């Protein structure tokens, strides 16, 4: 039974807009008094509300009428999060801003090891509830698809436990969850060496991930203090050979990760705060999506990824929250994306593309991120008559309604 | 009839902490299981909840018991806002991020003139409601005292109208409003010259402001394209001679304003993004409070005020939102202050001081900003057991309760 939702003061279907390169707001197709026809969770048609009503009216058409001015656009997609964890790192945060070094914080029991300790000690129920509540917050903010990485288990059993929690909690949640195995987050304290841990992931984690269908994606943190390019390359190539999709944490503090991501055909490389001209050029010539993580910039107080230059050279740019307890505790994707936009001088359309179909591309998803026939009817509505208010209010304008697979979220 | 509020998991009275210079978190006096005794809107005593209960129990003591873990601290003070306006500048914002220049935006009818046009056209009721709703949002976020500037009227009658709206709306609101006359925001299009407009303010606005007690403070925007140092100096000196308190918008894009503010004994100089070593040194040696406005940094995508260097040299640093429709549309002071903290490496205490007693100093107020006997019982409670969560969550942790003059805000 089809449902017609609308009229929207403005409906932004984001169709016919390139996945790559710079965009200007005049390229945006804004449908005034727009309507969207959905059936069985998919978009059937998008157009003027009254024209759709005239074309489809009859027995069986339900109308979900919007009585307040609303701007509608595809549900947001957060393509990079670390939401499955326990414990807070507020102490680290205060110490770091108070002038302590990374080494001092680690020596005092802080850093990622603290999150690993809390996460390992947490029950299934606690971790699942934490994840569920974070997904709730994201969904209320209009984020209908959320990537969630493991990475705070750092042993065979604990990484698999987290992936099972992510799968089961995600399956039960209204938002769609895309799981990624980030067992290669850092070298675990118990591991004999970098090589030993990567071999363990390949030999003991990846087969179970595949057999239980826990995740279709693997990630690795390529960085000084985490994993080297030399060790990461064969690791990623073997995973690719096994049929896994790849993504890379690259160029956060030092370069190397982005070129590796391009070389191995990763779907995305995320961070890029340290990327220079060579890295930008390589990304622009590749099919790898560049993912900016402004939440990490705001959490650490460092530079932003060179989003403007990446776009101008022709790269595909997505924007994700990196929500994690260490470097990106805010977890408000829209606020972060708006701020990235002011610092990097991104058009409204470039930001919205980075939160929707370009983020879908980073996840290898082609069924969402635009409002066109056959796509998932994932939709966010903001209480305004002008789409520019969404970024202008820098996260303070909250959605008035969110729809997942055509159904309103209450 | 005294009321005892508590127990707070942690109570931060912020007493015995200097108004000037750097602060470390170990200087923070954290009262566990704290209580605060209030009577007639003032703080009577602060200490351990059960000790206060034992000392004051008896006929007449009311207890307002907190049943969830709460961190309590003085209500925040936003010492720099432009909240009395109509209209949105979302179009400017999108154009600026999309690459248009200030001149192009102004030529298209944007910029401050657009806000002046909308504000002049707005009724008393509309402007009062806008201001009321913005004050409501601030109060829910724990901001119990709000400075509000005029400045979008830019004629004698319109500036006086705005100041009357600010006074009357402020008097009827639960938050305390401190009005400031910013008739010297920019040179009005109708004015014959800079000198002519400043003379009009002195001759026609200031006497009415004084007679009607509309504001105790005057502000001026010292900047290229606004007012010169040469013209601002005698203007401010004359206002000071008439008994007005002074504050200055200075060093946003070019320097000069901060030295002038120091020279004329202004209570504060606000912005300072362009301040260099000379300006920092002058401020550190003065009694003028340096006010950082991270909301303008995040709205425009430019640099932050040199908060760390100002503190290290010994200046008093307050943090304000600059909430205005052009350059600082976010209006979330806590988010902004937390982000300033990560970029400038400010301790938790430095940020909290900048939002409380140091902001009070910027307004020349000595009756709030600390929780000590005789101060106004303005208080904000956050639902956490660790005060460090307040900045760590970067504005996402909202107050669970706010008290103004000892009374809970519902």
Image: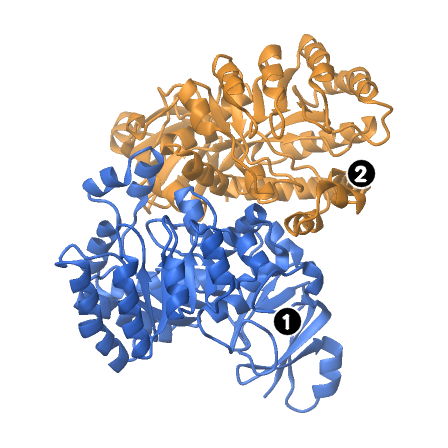
Chain colours: A orange, B blue
Taking the spot 58% from the left edge, 73% from the top edge, the residue there is B370
Q: Is residue B181 left or right of residue A122?
A: left
Q: Is residue A62 left or right of residue A123?
A: left
Question: Mark 2 or mark 1: which is in front?
Answer: 1
- The image quadrant of residue B201 is bottom left
Alpha carbon distance from label 2 to label 1: 37 Å
Q: Position of residue A1 (x, y in %)?
A: 42, 28
Q: Position of residue B88 (x, y in %)?
A: 30, 49
* Circle 2 residues within 10 Å: few <14, some 14–19, many ≥20: many
Q: Is residue B75 visible?
A: no
Q: Nearer the viewer, residue B22 or B234?
A: B234
Q: Position of residue A374 (x, y in %)?
A: 43, 20
Question: Residue lying farthest front?
Answer: B278
Query: Which residue is the site of mark 2?
Result: A120
- The image quadrant of residue A132 is top right
The reply to whether the C-beta atoms of the residues labelled 2 and 1 are less than 8 Å apart is no
Q: Residue B13 bears which disc, if any?
A: 1
Q: Residue A248 bears which disc, if any?
A: none
Taking the spot 62% from the left edge, 11% from the top edge, the residue there is A264
Q: Is residue B370 left or right of residue A337?
A: right
Q: Nearer the viewer, residue A341 or A88?
A: A341
What kind of element bears circle 2?
A: helix
Q: How many marks?
A: 2
């Amino acid at each position: 039974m089809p449902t017609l939702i609308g009229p929207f003061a403005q409906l932004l279907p984001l169709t016919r807009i390139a996945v790559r390169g710079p965009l200007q707001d005049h390229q945006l197709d804004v449908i005034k008094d727009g309507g969207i026809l959905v059936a069985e969770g998919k978009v059937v048609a998008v157009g003027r509300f009254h024209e759709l009503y005239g074309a489809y009216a009859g027995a069986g058409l339900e109308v979900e009428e919007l009585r307040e001015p609303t701007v509608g656009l595809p549900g947001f997609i957060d393509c990079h999060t670390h939401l499955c964890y326990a414990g807070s790192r507020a102490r680290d945060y205060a110490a770091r801003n108070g002038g302590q070094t990374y080494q001092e914080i680690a020596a005092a029991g802080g850093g990622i090891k603290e999150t690993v300790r809390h996460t390992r000690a947490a029950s299934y129920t606690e971790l699942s509830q934490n994840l569920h509540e974070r997904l709730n917050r994201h969904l209320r903010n209009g984020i209908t698809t959320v990537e969630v990485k493991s990475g705070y288990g750092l042993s065979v059993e604990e990484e698999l436990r987290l992936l099972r929690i992510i799968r089961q909690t995600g399956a039960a949640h209204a938002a769609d969850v895309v799981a990624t195995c980030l067992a290669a987050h850092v070298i675990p304290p118990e591991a004999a060496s970098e090589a030993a841990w990567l071999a363990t992931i390949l030999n003991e984690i990846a087969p179970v991930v595949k057999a239980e269908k826990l995740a279709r994606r693997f990630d690795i943190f390529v960085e000084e203090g985490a994993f080297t390019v030399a060790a990461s390359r064969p690791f990623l190539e073997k995973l690719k050979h096994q049929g896994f999709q790849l993504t890379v944490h690259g160029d956060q503090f030092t370069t190397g990760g982005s070129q590796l991501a391009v070389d191995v055909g990763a779907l995305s490389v995320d961070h890029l705060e340290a990327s220079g001209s060579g890295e930008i050029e390589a990304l622009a010539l590749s099919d790898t999506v560049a993912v900016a993580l402004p939440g990490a910039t705001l959490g650490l107080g460092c530079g932003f990824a060179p989003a403007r230059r990446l776009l101008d050279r022709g790269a595909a740019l997505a924007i994700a929250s990196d929500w994690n307890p260490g470097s990106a505790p805010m977890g408000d994707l829209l606020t972060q994306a708006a701020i990235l936009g002011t610092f990097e001088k991104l058009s409204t359309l470039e930001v919205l593309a980075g939160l929707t179909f370009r983020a879908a591309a980073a996840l290898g998803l082609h069924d969402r991120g635009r409002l066109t026939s056959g796509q998932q009817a994932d939709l966010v509505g903001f209480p305004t008559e002008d789409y520019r208010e969404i970024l202008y209010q820098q996260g303070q304008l909250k959605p008035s309604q969110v729809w997942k697979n055509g159904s309103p979220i209450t």
